[in-house]
Amino acid sequence: MSNTSYQAVITRKPEIIKKATNIDYAAFESGEIGFDYERMMSQVAYSLNKIRQIQQETGVGNTPLLELKNITALARQLAGPGKGARIFIKDEACNPSGSFKARRASVSVYHAKQHGYKGVVAATSGNFGAAIASQAAMRGLKSIIVQEVFDSRGIGQPEILEKGRACEAYGAEVIQMTVGPELFYQFLLVLEQTGYFNASLYTPFSICGIETLGTEIAEQTLLATGRKPDAVVVTHAGGGNVTGTARGLQRAGCESSQIVAASVDLKGLHMASDIDFNRKSFTTGHTGFGMPFATSPDRADVPRNAARPLRYMDRYVTITQGEVFYVTEMLAMLEGLERGPAGNTSLTAAFVMAQHMERDEVIVVQETEYTGAGKHPSPQLSFAKKNGIEVRRGNPIENVPGKAIIIPEHPGQINIKDINLGRVRQSYLRNALGSVGTGALHPQDIEFLAAETRLEAAIVEKKVRELQANL
């Protein structure tokens, strides 16, 4: 029997992951850090037509695109003359498990079934787990969800507990754990002991499943407005949402559509900290995931992450927790749509952006998600108060992650902050060079880094020299 100590299992990670994905990632690597991303996606992932067929079989996709006429009208009241773009929202809550993650789960579970796996395993805070469990039930596979739920006191966040309930409702075995590095160890151990498929958020199957979301946005927006979307706002956490949607939009000929990533600002909170774990009211769609996965995408549960957000985002903005709670209420009261928090992150950003766009322009909020007992603002805010967080009405500029959630008193107080993508790219390059230090890079390495950062090769070479000189 294999040694199941923490160190032994972590050491066996490469062979465990390879067996659980059936992907030889090394075949796409070259140079020191080079990685042929597009070749991996074309050879490993499925074609768009095949993805549509897979998703049609289990009722995934073809969700409605809804115009938010009342919210648009409110944005126009706050905008200058001639400003106030039309705001549309893609209602992904209509998918079987209630979120866009049904798209990425559908392809992963299909692939597992086709290749003889008896079950699937995923490590997730919940929405993806529910999607995996739902799709596995439809395909007749077992599912195990490894979920980080509790702090050291055994207290779990209401949103995560709600997601765990959803996973169990679809028949999954849910392994609930406290925050810390043991999550990944447990995940690897389950993969090894069961021989199940790694239904990771970050495989090519997962990312290509989201591409239909981008193509549907393009097709439905053109049908509804006679034009392609001028901007698409995507909630950004691990990067798959941005990557898959953008790739789908590109497939549909929307090269000029601006891709805007939006995250809740949780600067200063450490996601793996037991102290900070319950001092946040958002379990995804925040900078605690958004920044690390933008600057170091391969910190995933597969050797090479198929989510490469820096390749696709044209702009990256943040909003506060209180502003998202306000817009969640706005969506319900003005449009009659009660939806969960993640999609309302991008809606909050879109509400502000629309005020600075022309009236004939179109901005699309890329997703909604289902809501439930633990995902409502009320239990989340009550939980925050119990954990010593100040919750009050006021000016959201007074928001302090982990200390104060300030809910706007007026929609005109909602704002967005731009993250400097130049600095994000610089951080990405610094992290990428971590494994090679001052060593020489090959031409394919420079080509890879140029694609990753959307910079000219000559600029990348110059920046690499500067960074290596300071190592």
Image (cartoon, rainbow, N blue to C red):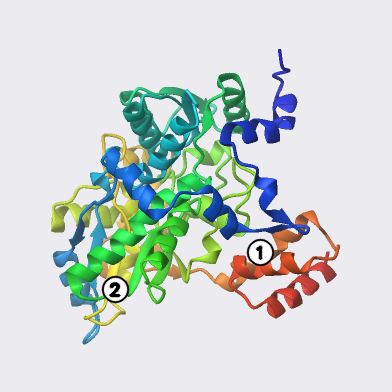
| Distance Cα–Cα, label 2 vs label 1 | 33 Å
As drawn, 364 above or below 1: below
x, y percentage for residue 469?
A: 84, 71
Residue type of the residue flagged with mark 2: Lys
Pinpoint residue 422: horizontal percent, then vertical percent: 59, 73
Q: Quick check: 286 left or right of 293?
A: left
Farthest-out residue, bottom:
81
Residue occupying image coordinates x 30% and y 72%: 229
Q: In this picture, is 419 found above or below 389?
A: below
Q: Is the residue marked by circle 1 packed among few (<14), some (14-19), or many (20+) residues within 10 Å?
A: some
Mark 2 lies on residue: 228
Asked if 2 appears above or below 58 in the picture, the reply is above
Q: Is residue 56 above or below residue 261?
A: above
Which residue is painted at 36% across and 37% down in the image? 131
Q: Which mark is residue 1?
A: none
Looking at the rendering, which quadrant does residue 447 occupy?
bottom right
Q: Quadrant of the N terminus?
A: top right
The foreground one among 186 and 341 is 186
Asked if residue 406 shows in the view, the reply is: no
Q: Return the residue at label 1.
A: 427
* Mark closer to the observer (2, 1): 2
